[in-house]
Image (spheres, rainbow, N blue to C red):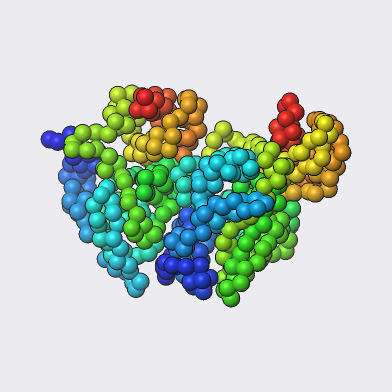
Amino acid sequence: MDEITLTRRVLLVTAVGAAVLPACAGVKSREMPPPKPTGDGLIDLALTVNGEKKTLHIEPRVTLLDALRENLGLTGTKKGCDMGQCGACTVLIDGKRVNSCLQLAVQQEGRSITTIEGLARNGKLHAMQQAFIAHDAFQCGYCTPGQILSACALLQERKPADDDEIRERMSGNICRCGAYPNIVAAIKEAAS
Amino acid sequence: MRLFIFQRAQSVDEAVNAQGAFLAGGTSLVDLMKLEVLNPDKVVDITRIGLDKIQEEASGLRIGALATNTDVAEHPLVKQKLPALSEALLSGASPQLRNVATVGGNLLQRTRCAYYRDLGTRCNKREPGSGCDAIDGWTRMHAILGGSEQCIAAHPSDMCVALAALEAVVRVRSATGSDRDLPIAELHLLPGDHPEREFALQSAELITSVFVPATPLAAKSRYIKVRDRQAYAFALASCAAAVEIDGGVVKAARFALGGVGTKPWRVPQAEAMLTGQRADKAAFAKAAARALEGAQPRKHNAFKVELAKRAVVRALSLAAGVAT
């Protein structure tokens, strides 16, 4: 199986789904249609995600995070605190790192969104993804997509001078497993 | 989050006539809408109406209301002419939040009082007349200056503390299309008997820019923030200070406190005490004591009185180039 399409979700759902989850929550949840309209005021929306144009028909109150995960099936972006404090939902909007949980999807029309799914090129992982693997920069992996996108943006902004600067500038991404020393090491390697 | 009508404004005039809650970076409004603390019927996206320029004028910098915290903090002219503003912004939030949070939104940032954010408790700011569960509650993060029996919520902004010390002036557009200028000291209201009234703004008014005088004083300004952890935390106490010295004697001084007041806290009488004094820690400590006069600590925040005084002395020392 292709290494990149073998996601954590596919593994989890395949392993657990048959025994525990109802049929509707199986692998096919990735292709689930958007939620049915529940009232007036839905909005047609075109988003550019990982270079692809996506169209949505959603309530204006849907956050970018929920639109990515629930409507577009891009579950690599994680929902942690859902209030802008943990950084698990970090994506790039026009190249800048942003908490997608505090952005409304409807505000993003015409902007270019990059999620963790958009980092690999032609089946080859991004250098930051490789560095995270090389340095074992995660344990449970839940915060990792946000950490990696935040780290990519950090290097894009400017090269950090030292470890303290990396820590300060990565402070918007919390890792409850405490993989911080290895995250710093991975970013240092990717920076060099 | 409750349903709302969404409108994307294309111009400042369209925004002020839209009669809705202005949405820019979303870091306050979307957060509070999710908690259902704020429930606007209509939300007006103002991120595409310009207002994001930072421009040099004859006597200072004019910063557009939609310039992001990152844009302002990293701007070479801000770093050079208003270092306290850059330092204050960089001490606040995280890179992700600073990338979208705007100057206008930061000026109107809501309190982080846990009771304001929790619908299960009483809060006069959220629900006028309902009572305040903070006063006899967990008060460690609350204000010790400017509170009332109705509200002791601390003002959360770092940026506003720097802007208060730098005597910024906020420009506001009304629905009739006219502009007015408001000194920052007048923008934020004390809670008094009406903590729900937070700003000296009319409902349809939109902040379009803030002007910050680029004085010799401002060029030597600094910002100090004391918090529970080294990054990404709200202030327990903070201080923006600027000191102009001639031959070891203070010619002029400005400072403002954060984390301790119900609004960015400035005491002109304490600043005036410094004029003509030797620029040393003894003089700074006297001014700090004057600034904290009348402080009303609660059960869990008595430590803030001394902490704030030390923050003032530290910030003035740094700005004056006196050893800390």
Q: Is residue A59 above or below residue A26?
A: below
Q: Is residue A49 above or below residue A127?
A: below
- Give the percent coordinates (x, y) of residue A139: 34, 29
Q: Residue at x 33, y 23 (%)?
A: A135
Q: Nearer the viewer, residue B247 or A77?
A: B247
Q: Is residue B227 left or right of residue B292?
A: left
* Image quadrant in which the N terminus of chain A is located: top left
Q: Residue at x 39, y 62 (%)?
A: A61
Q: Nearer the viewer, residue B98 or B41?
A: B98
Identify the image quadrant of residue A97: top left
Q: Residue at x 52, y 42 (%)?
A: B74
- Give the percent coordinates (x, y) of residue B266: 75, 49
- Give the percent coordinates (x, y) of residue B34: 46, 57
- Give the percent coordinates (x, y) of residue B73: 55, 43
Q: Residue at x 50, y 64 (%)?
A: B22
Q: Nearer the viewer, residue B92 or B63?
A: B63
Q: Is residue A80 visible?
A: no
